[in-house]
Image (cartoon, helix red, strand yellow):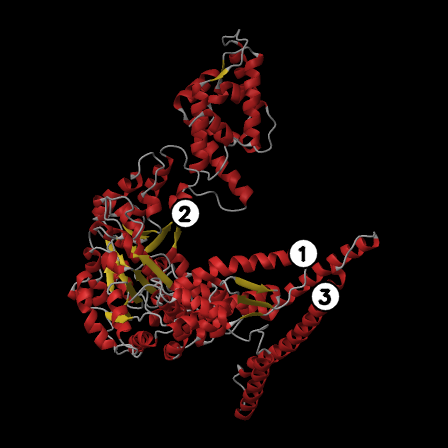
Amino acid sequence: MELDQLIKKLDDETRSIFENAVGKAVQLNHFEVTDVHFLSVLFDCDLVSFAPFMKRDMSVALQDMNKWLENQKNGHEGYPKINQKLVRIIFDAWMLASTEFESIAIKPEYILLAMLENPICKAELAGISSVLADLDAKEVKQLIINDDASQNGSKPVSSSALQKFTQNLTEQAKNGKLDGIVGRDQETRQLIDVLSRRRKNNPILVGEAGVGKTAVVEGLAVKIANNEVPTSLQNTALYSLDVGALQAGASVKGEFENRLKAVIKEIQNSPVPAILFIDEAHTLLSSKHAGTQNDAANLLKPALARGELRTIAATTWSEYKQHIESDPALERRFQEVKVNEPEEPEAIAMLSSLVEGLEKHHQVHILQEAIDASVRLSKRFLTGKQLPDKGVSVLDTACARVSLSQQTIPALLETQAASLLDIDKQIKRLTLESSLGFKSEEIDVLEAQKEALQTKHDELETLWVDAKGILDSIIELRSQLESTELKSEERNELCRQLKESRASLHELQVDTHLVYECVDATTIAAVIADWTGIPSKQMQRNDVERVLTLPEKLSQRVIGQEAALKQVTQALQNAHAKLHDPRRPLAVLMLVGPSGVGKTETALALAEQLYGSDQQLTTINMSEFKEPHKVSLLMGAPPGYAGYGKGGLLTEAVRRKPYSVILLDELEKADKAVHEMFYQVFDKGVLRDSEGRDVDFKQTVIIMTSNTASDHIEYLCSKNDVLPEIDHLLDEIQPSLRRDFDPAFLGRVTLVPYFPLSASTLELIVQQQLKNIGQRIEEHYKVSFTYTDAVIDMLVNQCKESDIGARLVAMKINNSLLPELSQALLSALAKDQQLNPVCVDIDDNNQWLLNL
């Protein structure tokens, strides 16, 4: 370590002594600052912190050192350099401070001890003074330990590496500080099996973040504490290694390795059997403190292989592959134990085991429906996290929200009060401006806003006070019901009163929830709605209800495709009725037909209706996969290639959003090798990515779009006034489809043909587009929007011969009508004109006529 870095480690007293030692060397015109300069200044100081070490008269030693210094070579007129021996002593003092005394700074006594432990320095000091020769390093060290203990009011500082860098989980379990584990019996048995081996008895728990790897080890500690383990593991101490403490302050080369060696040695020499648990093992095994990546791993390998150091490690899959699997010598010393995300029943059981602690902490009551909703809704809507962790987070947050509602003013009331305060400030400022002769027409508007807001605030405050009173009576009734001394008649009467109070509270808060009696499914949905932006009512809708109303909802967004939508909804209803093959995705649909007829819009509508938001749609443009090697973009780059470990476009999207709609747009443009990749997805609902993880597609809806056979479809639909039957149409377009898709591929999908848009359908689409514009105008300008039949006729005539279908309607409106309409509105605003209802018409030259 460089001198400037060591100087920064000195505490204030030591730095002052060091500066005075340099000053003394300058006064004596010495060429170097030595350890004797430092020690002479130290003994000449009256330091309170150094008092315990001045057990004998050091005046003689000080005289001897000053006499020795006067006899040293002098005549130097510049700034003296620091002697390398003194630098080494300060470095040794830093090692003592950080490793033995757990100090973050170098104190004067540490430098004295470093001098006495240095044989060369000790011999030199003995030659200078007989008093210095009598100083004993062990005595000084014990004085330091006792002094630290007296300052801390505790026992002397222990030099045990286990006490410094680990936590005894078995001891914590015996003291009731750890909870048992539910639903991980298989993983716990695997741990015990591996730990009971004679050699290579080192399990490593591998799983995604949040699945409960650490909880499995804590559960094992509880079993050891309760003697619920085989004889070979009874009375075993399970130590959890604090990697952060092990690394903290270990900036000096070799210090980190010395600490780890000390931990390993104490584990091996422990009087009772000991197991070391390394959580987030990759942070230790990829340590770079010594300049090489695997120094920590190399220290562990021999002990792990011989079975002398039983170790449990835990890490995630990505870190396991990057730091452990890449080192075969290290990997073979561990036995992999997979910790997968639990299924819903197991997750519910895990959360149920935590309910008592949550209720005690938050002083609330948790209903079973809240536990079920925490698991079910978090699994569906909180992507990127794992059960049970995300379920616990949701339930804990809901408990906090209910507890706060019972103790504090509602956020809505606080927001309204803040808004009233802001309006008051504006009114005062404008009133002052008016008194100074400035124009201020906004005062009347603000006064009206204040009056309306004050009325709302008063009504809401009254509602909150009433609801809080009812809630207090409910809590009182509940506490009375918990008494075991109640008679049957008294209990029935209390139950009746409680039922009436709950009904009153519900009726009072039909529109606005200000206080909550308990944690229920509604509270859970509200928490997830705040986190995701998905409306809570949408989340709480029953899946059966969603699917039954699907035809009506889809037809509102996709116009003129009743036959296609019927096929789509039938496939989804089959899946939700549990009649489809459970190994496959919910539906695999291939939508074929001309461009702009509603295929992509169908996918968007399905994502919103089935999963609550169109954000649950993953769109992949298959025209980017024209070469066979582009398959790696979907599944992830193979080992050794750029991008390995980052996941594939498809696999990563589904892994993060397992409940979603997958849209493979323009599939016919992808290479046949890409088509073949989907066979296992369509058949088994699983795709293995480049990292060996199986990605589950069973809860997804896969939609593929293709313009193949669109010309043939248009021709068949134009032959007669009546549209052809679906079965007949599919038979006719089979030859066209087989030119782009293999029969094996077509046999795995449900073909859904989309018809070209008729004039009547285009008219409905135009009306829908104009209606949307009207809604935006009414929202922002508070005026109505109307249009004539001539506008609709013109747009329909311009778009009915288009190759891009309904997309041309949007293009015509966006590029033609909206520019003129926006210019007219902005001009009216600039001139401060009063806006009239907006009416759109056309003249004889098909030009827009706008009446504002």
Whether pointer 2 and pointer 1 mark residues with C-beta atoms closer than 8 Å, the reply is no
Residue placed at 80% from the left, 57% from the top? 431
Q: Which amino acid type is marked by label 1? A: Lys
Q: Nearer the viewer, residue 159 or 20?
A: 20
Residue farthest to the top, as pictured: 75
SS label for mark 1: loop
SS label for mark 3: helix
Mark sitting earlier along the chain (3/2): 2
Name the residue tied to disc 2: 163
Residue farthest to the bottom, as pictured: 489
SS label for mark 2: helix
Establish if 267 lies above or below 559.
above
Q: Nearer the viewer, residue 94 or 706?
A: 706
Q: Quadrant of residue 288?
A: top left
Q: Which amino acid type is marked by label 3? A: Lys
Asked whether the viewer can see residue 735, the reply is yes
Mark sitting earlier along the chain (1/3): 3
Which tag is nearer the camera, tag 1 or tag 3?
A: 1
Name the residue tied to disc 3: 450
Measured as percent of width and height from the top left, residue 76 is found at: 52, 8
Q: Nearer the viewer, residue 176 or 796?
A: 796
Measured as percent of width and height from the top left, residue 209 is found at: 36, 56
Which quadrant, please, contains the N terminus? top left
Residue placed at 26% from the left, 77% from the top? 724
Which tag is nearer the camera, tag 2 or tag 1?
A: 1
For residue 831, the mark is 1
Establish if 483 lies above or below 376.
below
Whether pointer 3 and pointer 2 mark residues with C-beta atoms closer than 8 Å, the reply is no
Measured as percent of width and height from the top left, residue 74 is found at: 52, 8
